[in-house]
Amino acid sequence: MSKLKKSTVGLMIGALGVVFGDIGTSPLYALTAAFGKLGFHLRIDTTNVYGVISLLIWSVSLIVSIKFIHFIMRADNRGEGGIMALVTKLKESTLAYNYKWYFVIIGIIGVALFYGDSTITPAISVLSAVEGLNIISPHLSSFVIPVTLIILSGLFAIQRFGTGIIGKFFGPIMFMWFVVIGLGGGWQILKHPSVLIALSPWTAIHFFYSQPVLAFVAMGAVVLAITGTEALYADMGHFGKRPISRSWFWVVFPSLLLCYMGEGALMVHNPAAANSPFFLLYPVLLQTPIVILATLATVIASQAVISGAFSLTRQAVQLDFLPKMVINHTSTRETGQIYVPFVNLVLFVIVVLLVVMFGSSTRLADAYGVAVSGTLAIDTILYLVIMHSVWHKRSWKVFLAGLAFLPIDLLFVASTIPKILQGGWVPVLIALILMVLITTWIKGQVVIIRERKALEGPLQKFIDDVNHEKPAISRIPGTAVYIAHHSDLTPMALHATFNDLHELHQEVIIVSVEITDQAHIPEKERAVIDNLGYDDGIIHVSLFYGFHDAIHIPETLKKLSHHYKELDTNLDGASYLISLTRVVLTRRHNLARWRKAIYLLMARNAVSTSDYYKLPIGRTVEMRSLIKL
């Protein structure tokens, strides 16, 4: 096997472990949600079961195999995917500013819904696997909730150590999982081959035509089979489109088809199996190891969603959609492996509450799907806008794409609306809270930036003043690095040392950080250096980072010093000076009072600039000033 082929196979195995965990474990609960005793109470007969299976198969085919893999995954941002990539690509569009902002808000709603999904996935996945204890022995049912909470506690506890080491084992375990579920389903199909009729799209069409109300209700359970689809797109940057698509078509998709059809065949010939069709696919002797394997698979599925929430949070922080927070990098080689303590804690608390409140995977399934369907519909809307305004595709092509995908997405959204009263309000509430926080922070930042600009003044004018008053300014030995909030403005800390202390260091480096719409910025394109028109030891350095890049100013400056003579100075002993602002509330009508209170709370709990930029504690000086909101 050539080196290239070995690399491709490695990426495919890695994709199995990270990308497909969520969608790959949906057979544990999808059909139970439709036919189980706590589900939608659909009558178990050949017409209903085969109709639902056919709906499920063709929904997965159209949404995953066609819409995402063949279309939406083309809308990447330098190889990175996910709803945030769609939002950032909108800035390249020819739309007017107001329209761009409208679609950015729609994207933010999708981001918020993803967080709602992130809380339910670990709860329903692990709980559905541990419920296999009921199949092993009914006496073990009292252990389901405690064991689930123990596993989830361990999962969230190990997040701080990163997934670099255990990630190596995810792929092989998930490969084993897909082989096992395919064999289990295939065995039932061999015994009851009549279920193969579900492969025909006419079975789904006939079911919808003959029983439209039942089919519409069933779509609320079918949507559970496409949970995790967003991960195909969001994790594209880690593995690439080709390994993901090959893993899907060669391993995941065939295994899921076999498993779902096997569950359907089992239920038709044994209606009592509807409460746990997955585990009953296997003989009694194999059920205990299957429960163990399912638990491992759901932990991996949960890990993928948690990691996705960390990644999305970092992107939102770097694009200034959220305040700065502690982001720890758990790998020196992979920038995607991060740990966000605050997000980890919040997710853990909500997941534990969900497990205790709902108590079973079937009840949780009532709350699941609302966030998923909403996110998928928003992906389609943003993709259509990009087709029209970024790629400038002909209107008829955009119309056909919308006609092919949007009605299906809206049907899923409509079918999950009744779930809101049955528990679906949980992800909706979480998304609503996130929406309020994100939009409040964005609006508040607009006001604060405007106030800061008025205080700081133009940088070039400040440099002209410094050179005009040279005799009155003392230049002390050493290097000082001032962190600027804007490339054209003067840091307030620099104002203070000039106006109050009447001194400056011999070497002054003014650093501003720009987060671009690109995922990664190559090191050779990382910096732009400007001497501001004078040879006076004062330079301005613009550092450019992608929204997926790790920000570490001292480390970046040190690397750049090997390429730029202007930075060839004593950076190891440099002092870092930052301008901190304390926001105070006023009666001005620039923001609603309730939003001001929320913004103030977020600002005061944000991580400090020195921590966020990884500045050395012993050589960092913080200067504070007041900003009125």
Image (cartoon, rainbow, N blue to C red):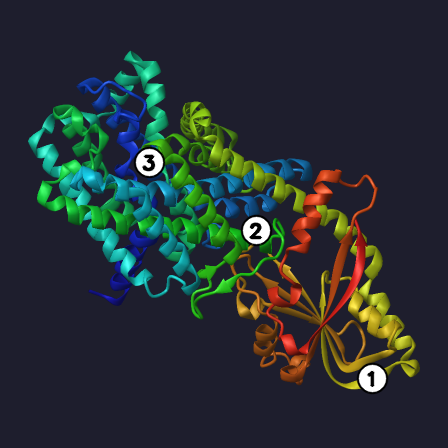
Residue 360 tag number: 3
Relative depth, front residue between 387 and 462: 462
Residue 303 is situated, as x and y percent measured from the top left of the image, at 37, 52
**In which quadrant will I find the N terminus?**
bottom left
Residue 178 is situated, as x and y percent measured from the top left of the image, at 22, 47
Label 3 environment density (alpha carbons within 10 Å; few <14, some 14–19, many ≥20):
some
Relative depth, front residue between 296 and 113: 296
Marks 3/1: CA–CA distance: 70 Å
Q: Most extreme residue toward the left, as rendered?
A: 191
- What amino acid is found at the position of numbered circle 1 in the picture? Arg
Marks 3/2: CA–CA distance: 33 Å
Q: Which residue is mark 1?
A: 475
- At 40% across and 33% down in the image, what residue appears? 369
Mark 2 lies on a secondary structure that is helix
First of labels 2, 1 by sequence position: 2
Q: Which residue is mark 2?
A: 316
Marks 2/1: CA–CA distance: 40 Å
First of labels 3, 1 by sequence position: 3
Relative depth, front residue between 506 and 341: 341
